[in-house]
Image: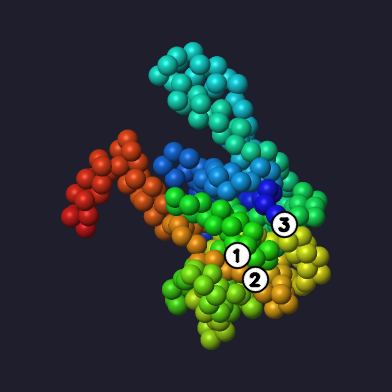
Amino acid sequence: MKIKKAVIPAAGLGTRVLPATKAMPKEMIPIVDKPAIQYIVEEAVKSGITDILIIISRGKSIIEDHFDRMPELETKLKAGGECKRELLNEVVGVAKLANITYIRQQEQNGLGHAVLQAKSFVGNEPFAVLYGDDVIIGDDPCLAQLCRVYEKYGMGVVGIKEVSGDHIHRYSSMKVSYMSENIYKITDMIEKPPKGKEFSNFSILGRCILQPEIFDILERIPYGFGNELQLTDAMKEIAIKDGLIGIDFVGNRYDMGDKLGILQASIEVGLKNKEFGNEFKAYLKELVKTF
Ligand code: UTP
């Protein structure tokens, strides 16, 4: 079965990026000229997704505005003639990327609680989750890699990567056994493992494909780490019962919920920019000599 629906949780408080995120959603922080969440929506669309639910919260309606039409701006750009045509197409194109709807998570009770808000949108079919602050850039869209694995195995799939031993306690840790190429079977997991409780350095980073059974689990499990409803705790049940498939995906992942991640994203994407990438590279080369 093809995956057509995706959920993007973007309702979090973004406390790791304060004060920038006091009034502005971290998902709207730009990487060069596009907000993070646009990269994520574009990845979903390139992966075959047609319907997207973005989970937002108070103060985040700027995300809705970004994916809406803006007649005043369009009229102005149209009047600018040929030289503004490309910009006009881009601005209109953003509003036509997919069928996007929104729901508010009224209290920030964690990623699992955010995903639970998607229950009626999802209905009875498998769906993708793309974390709203995880931008993944690569020639083969990350979610498309997960979709292909889902079509092959028909089981829940999570995007995984190895993180350093010093950092694994900030993420989730997967119990994995190798299957083939970059594919692993996952049979257990733990969210934010204390030292000594890690299964491996493999962590879920930003993408999964889940069956609707996840909602029943989320509705009955207790709140976990940080007194939040953890998506990892719900996926753990499925991993122990049926197993999940982990794909060590190809692509560069940027954590837009982290100050260093935001800087890395801007520099790497900026260096690849067709218009000014070379100039930027020359600038950086000179700059590093002074440090
Ligand atoms: P994070 O845990 O990184 O987001 O969740 P956060 O709570 O904003 O992070 P802090 O405050 O800096 O630690 C990953 C994704 O899930 C969303 C976030 O917006 C982010 O895109 N999320 C998180 C929700 O939608 N609701 C929540 O209650 C928590």
Q: Are marks 2 and 1 in contact (CB under 8 Å)?
A: yes
- At label 2, counting other C-alpha atoms closer than 10 Å, the crowd grade (few under 14, some 14-19, many 20 or more) is many
Assess whether mark 2 and mark 3 are in contact (beta carbons under 8 angstroms): no
- Residue furthest front as drawn: 152
Quadrant housing residue 277: top left
Please tell me in which quadrant of the rendered image residue 231 appears.
bottom right
Q: How far separated are the C-alphas under marks 2 and 1?
A: 7 Å
The residue lying at 55 percent from left, 16 percent from top is 75
Secondary structure, mark 1, is strand
Residue 81 x, y percent position in the rendering: 45, 14
Residue 191's spot in the image, x, y percent? 61, 73
Query: Whole-percent x and y of residue 169?
Result: 53, 75
Where is mark 2, residue-wise?
244
Disc 1 residue type (three-letter): Val
Q: Is mark 1 within 8 Å of ligand 1?
A: no
Q: CA distance from mark 1 to mark 3?
A: 13 Å
275 horizontally vs 47: left or right: left
Q: Amino acid at mark 3?
A: Pro
Which residue was labeled with disc 3? 126
Of marks 2 and 1, which one's residue comes earlier in the chain?
Answer: 1
Mark toward the start of the polypeptide (1 vs 3)? 3
Helix, strand or loop under label 3: loop
- Mark 2 residue type: Leu
x and y, in percent, of residue 267 in the image: 35, 50
Q: Is 268 above or below relative to 223?
A: above
- In depth, the one of 75 and 189 nearer the eye is 189
Alpha carbon separation for disc pair 3 and 2:
14 Å
Q: In the displayed structure, does residue 201 sit left or right of residue 47?
A: left
Write down the residue under mark 1. 158
The one of 34 and 209 positioned closer to us in this rendering? 209
The residue that appears at 43% across and 73% down in the rendered structure is 164
